[in-house]
Amino acid sequence: MMLAAIYVTVMGIIFAKTMCHNLLMIPGPVEFTDTVLAAAGGQPMSHMDKSFAGQFGEAIELLRQVALTKTGQPFILAGSGSLGWDIFAANFIESGEHVLVINTGYFGDRFVDTFEAYNITVTQVHTTLPGTPPSLLDVESAIKAASVPFKAVTITHVDTSTGVLMDVKKVAALVRTLLPSALIVVDGVCSFGAESLFFDDWDVDFVLTASQKALGVPPGLCVVIASQRALSVLDARSTSVPSYYANLKKWLPIMRAYEAKTPAYFATPPVQLVQALQVSLLEILRGSDMAGRFAHHVEVSNYVKDKVESWGLKLVTTSREAEAHTLTAVYLPTGVTLPDLLPKVLKQGVMIGGGLHVNIAPKYFRIGHMHISSLNTSLGHIDTTLSAIQAALLETGYDVQKQMAEPEWVPRGKSSATGHDEL
Ligand SMILES: Cc1ncc(COP(=O)(O)O)c(C=O)c1O
């Protein structure tokens, strides 16, 4: 029986790895490890099984370590990153209250839409130039100009549509000085687990993310972490939470029970995805410490950006200080279109993304580089991707060689600071 189960799992992995698998180098979902794949395809198990409660509880504890918080309360729910917007709007802001959205692109627009669906008044700070973040001065002016103090300020840590990185540390410090009791919210869908984020030290209140990016798990989980300040705001609401499934008052006792390794039920969790998350978090934390993981992402991101610039291409981000380390957004050379380039890259077994920002979408492509694709150089994902893009560009008639001035890069071997094979 046991042998049969192992056989089925191994065959499943081989099948999944070999059939129809293009190297996935979009900015999420991303490639994940074989152990995560095995956990995600695991045997049926009851969500009320005591051993599952143990795994769920461990995932909660490990999330605190990844977020670098001692007191933040993680919640793991079936859903995607977008559910995190609903959770924040429904639980922490009441109808008619005001929030400030620092909007760096496509996903900031969607956070605004979510607030509006709950009748919440939104002020926005954004720049008109895609690829450029608003300045601290813009944020300060918006806060000072507001007739009613904002209940919350939201920051998209990495805008996946353009690759803009916001300096969460500096924005959070500014907001805390000007609005000491405001909730500081980080959309970390394209950053959490890869970009520097120190939940307690930076005094943020709410981080939302999803399983399919730097956490290295298939899509299907929404993960949020709320500070104790945020939980007291939830407690002090004068109106009821305008959501059933997304009501954290229903989920808090469930998360606490799981953390105490006791099964509990409000709605059925996606058992195998939670198991996959627990496995992935263990792998992440078994590698370098979080600061080391953040630094690896910076190193690989710089390599990718140097390389595409050496081909004479222009990045969408307009300054190195404000560029994400989880993806690179690159303008197409004149005369080359997305329908021309992307299939040529795909033909070589690599999938990269097209543009997403409404003003410039047809003009650029995006390369995701997070989690194992960034950290485990022995997999060769980065160089395979760059070679595929280079060859595809040549095929379109754009002469990469002519522009080349190779950046110097010493790849980290298998025995790098991560210390194990997969990460
Ligand atoms: C920054 C950001 N926020 C929110 C989302 C929405 O997440 P999901 O597609 O998992 O609902 C995404 C998706 O890519 C994102 O990149």
Image (tube, helix red, strand yellow):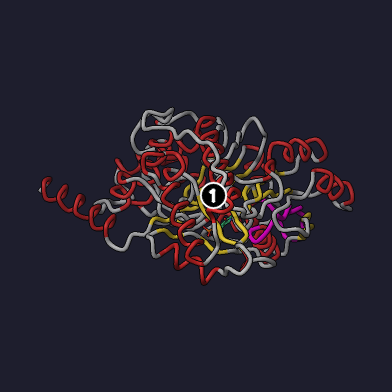
Find out whether residue 102 is within the magenta segment.
yes
In which of the image's four quarters is ligand 1 placed?
bottom right
Q: Quadrant of residue 70?
A: top right
The reply to whether residue 27 is in sight is yes
For the point 48% across and 50% down, the residue is 213
Q: Which of 15 and 255 is in front in this view?
A: 15
Q: Nearer the viewer, residue 337 or 406?
A: 406
Disc 1 secondary structure class: strand
For the point 29% across and 51% down, the residue is 46
Q: Nearer the viewer, residue 216 or 263?
A: 216
The local crowd at label 1, few if under 14, some if 14 to 19, many if 20 or more residues have their Cα within 10 Å, is many
Name the residue that disc number 1 marks.
Answer: 209
Q: Is residue 5 above or below residue 258?
A: below
Q: Residue furthest bottom?
A: 339
Q: How many labels does the image show?
A: 1
Mark 1 lies within 8 Å of ligand 1 (Cβ measured): no
Viewed as shown, does residue 342 lie left or right of 276?
right
Q: In which quarter of the image is residue 294?
A: top right
Find out whether residue 371 is within the magenta segment.
no
**Magenta span:** 92-107
The reply to whether residue 234 is in sight is no
Q: Is residue 76 above or below residue 116?
A: above
Give residue 121's position: percent from left, percent from top: 77, 60
